[in-house]
Amino acid sequence: MTHFSHKNQEINNHRIDLHCHSTYSDGLLSPREIIEQAIHAQVQTLALTDHDTIAGLSELHEAAQHSNIRIIDGIELSAAWKKHAVHILGLNINPSHNGLKQLLSKQLDNRKIRAKQISDKFAQIGINNMWEKCYELAQHERIGRPHFARVLVNQGVCLDIRTAFRKYLIQGRPAYVASTWLPLEDVVTTIIACGGIAVIAHPLKYSFTRTKLKEFIISFKQAGGTSLEVISGEMTNESILEATKLCAQFELTASTGSDYHGPGVSRIKLGHQAILPTLCPPIWLQF
Ligand code: AMP
Ligand code: MN
Ligand code: MN
Ligand code: MN
């Protein structure tokens, strides 16, 4: 077992979480409740990174006003790379930037079309009105696969979210629809254009081979990307070591986040991800 030093945290005496979700995408808590959790967990720097939307940021800022939490404006953008769906975090973005708004409007159109198609596929196997049920649950149109999964669980069709994904929603299963996200290059370019830093989210969760993962990192760098989420949610020491090596090999800065989606969904709490190894240059020095 490798033991990682707590030095990064000691130097800064700083708890930081740069990846989480609210009810504005597929999280269970509102931005206000996220701030309550952040205060409880003594998080000092926080980024809300909802999927393909900045809609939760104003509520987040409002809720954080009377706390000492520093908010970094963030987003988690879905992107297409060689027929794969990948996730790129944009940190320290300017949410009012026009180029970003245009990109988000295209992503939303694609997400809405996909949600209808997924719903049609469920109807074909006798599971009806899924779009309506997802909309009722989400209370917005940014419907993702987790909303479908939660409806299936609430209706007793599946025991848990993981099973719902495995039985219906992943590639090869009856309600899978290939996404049509914008290309990696456009996503990275737009993040940079609006003043943000582009970060590869959860690099070890794509079930890529090592060679493919490195190819992906090279494409990301060619597009202008500079950072890797070395610590992402729950990780083993082995995966931390692997991500740290990638960070060093490709000379990227390092980000850290819980990828918190709410109680019961995420096993670790907001701000409770492992500490960033000292070897990694922390992204927050760039904010
Ligand atoms: P979408 O962007 O609609 O395709 O949904 C992606 C989201 O679904 C991710 O951000 C996770 O929150 C969740 N997710 C993806 N794969 C799984 C899985 N196998 N089990 C549970 N949740 C998953
Ligand atoms: Mn999610
Ligand atoms: Mn993700
Ligand atoms: Mn996420």
Image (tube, rainbow, N blue to C red):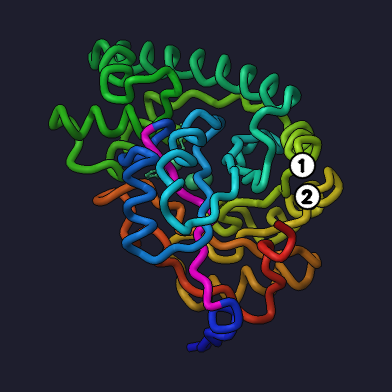
Residue at x-position 77% and y-position 48%: 220
The amino acid type found where label 2 is placed reads Gly
Q: Nearer the viewer, residue 207 or 94?
A: 94
Direction front: furthest residue: 66
Magenta highlight range: 13-23
Q: Do the residues labelled 1 and 2 touch (CB within 8 Å)?
A: no
Residue 253, given in percent of the width and then of the height, sits at 73, 64
Q: Nearer the viewer, residue 123 or 113?
A: 113
Residue at x-position 35% and y-position 64%: 41
Residue at x-position 68% and y-position 74%: 280
- The residue labelled by disc 2 is 225
Quarter of the rendered image showing ligand 1: top left
- The residue labelled by disc 1 is 195
Residue 40, given in percent of the width and then of the height, sits at 32, 62
Direction right: furthest residue: 222
- Is ligand 3 within 8 Å of the beta carbon of the residue shown at mark 2? no
Is residue 59 depicted above or below 258 in this figure?
A: above
Is residue 219 depicted above or below 153 in this figure?
A: below
Is residue 43 depicted above or below 164 in this figure?
A: below
Residue at x-position 60% and y-position 82%: 11
Describe the element under mark 2 as helix, strand or loop. Answer: loop
Q: Which of 125 and 263 is in front in this view?
A: 263
Q: For residue 163, what is the image quadrant? A: top left
Which of the two discs, 1 and 2, sits closer to the camera?
Answer: 1
The amino acid type found where label 1 is placed reads Gly
- Judged left or right of residue 93, residue 146 is left
